[in-house]
Image (spheres, helix red, strand yellow):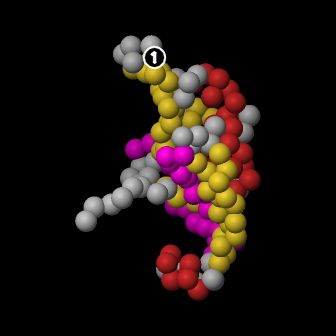
Amino acid sequence: MTIKQMHHVGVVVDDLDAAVAFFLELGMELEERTPVEGTWVDRVVGLEGVRVEIAMVRTPDGQSRLELTAFATPTATTTEPDAPANTIGLRRLMFAVDDIHDTVDRLRAHGGELVGEIAQYEEMFLLCYLRGPSGIIVALAEELS
């Protein structure tokens, strides 16, 4: 037996509204936003008294989903809020875009900040890392013709 598909990636955020706005500006679509709590979620995540609000966003092709989760209780924690790109663990989400400069400009209006700069990889791609809400690093790639 093998997996059927990857359903989604989950990211804990401190400001759900800001995170949703950021990813909608990137071009994702809001699929659902809902509060979640109860014994079943406590059991799944191994914490007690969990109350969260989640927003599920998906790529326009419907193939990839991102679950943004804001904890009301217990309080979300972090060991290093603006960890560098070489920190062990989930560090970035990569998206292919049509126009990297326009995308960066639009995401800056939602708190996005370049980690480094937009760079060209050979004659194939323009690439960059952008830090968004809750320190999430979004990698962007524009394929060059």
Write down the region rendered in magenta: 62-86
Name the side, left or right, on which 26 lies relative to 10.
right
- The residue at 36%/16% (across/down) is 122
Count of picture labels: 1
Answer whether residue 60 is visible to the viewer in this image: yes
The answer to whether 137 is drawn above or below residue 115 in the figure is below
Residue 144 falls in which quadrant of the image?
A: top left
Q: Would residue 71 be counted in the magenta stretch?
A: yes
Under mark 1, the amino acid is Leu
Q: Which residue is mark 1?
A: 144
Name the side, left or right, on which 125 lies relative to 18.
left
Image position, residue 80 (x, y; %): 53, 55
The answer to whether 43 is drawn above or below residue 69 in the figure is below
- The residue at 33%/60% (across/down) is 3
Q: Quadrant of the C terminus?
A: top left
Name the side, left or right, on which 89 lies relative to 23.
left
The answer to whether 53 is drawn above or below residue 99 in the figure is below
- The residue at 25%/65% (across/down) is 1
Q: Would you call the spot at circle 1 few (<14 residues within 10 Å), some (14-19), or many (20 or more)? A: few
Secondary structure state at the residue bearing disc 1: loop
Answer whether residue 131 is visible to the viewer in this image: no
Work out whether residue 90 or residue 57 is closer to the camera in this orientation and state it. 57
Q: Would residue 137 be counted in the magenta stretch?
A: no
Image position, residue 120 (x, y; %): 44, 18
Task: Tell me the chief SS of the magenta region.
Answer: loop
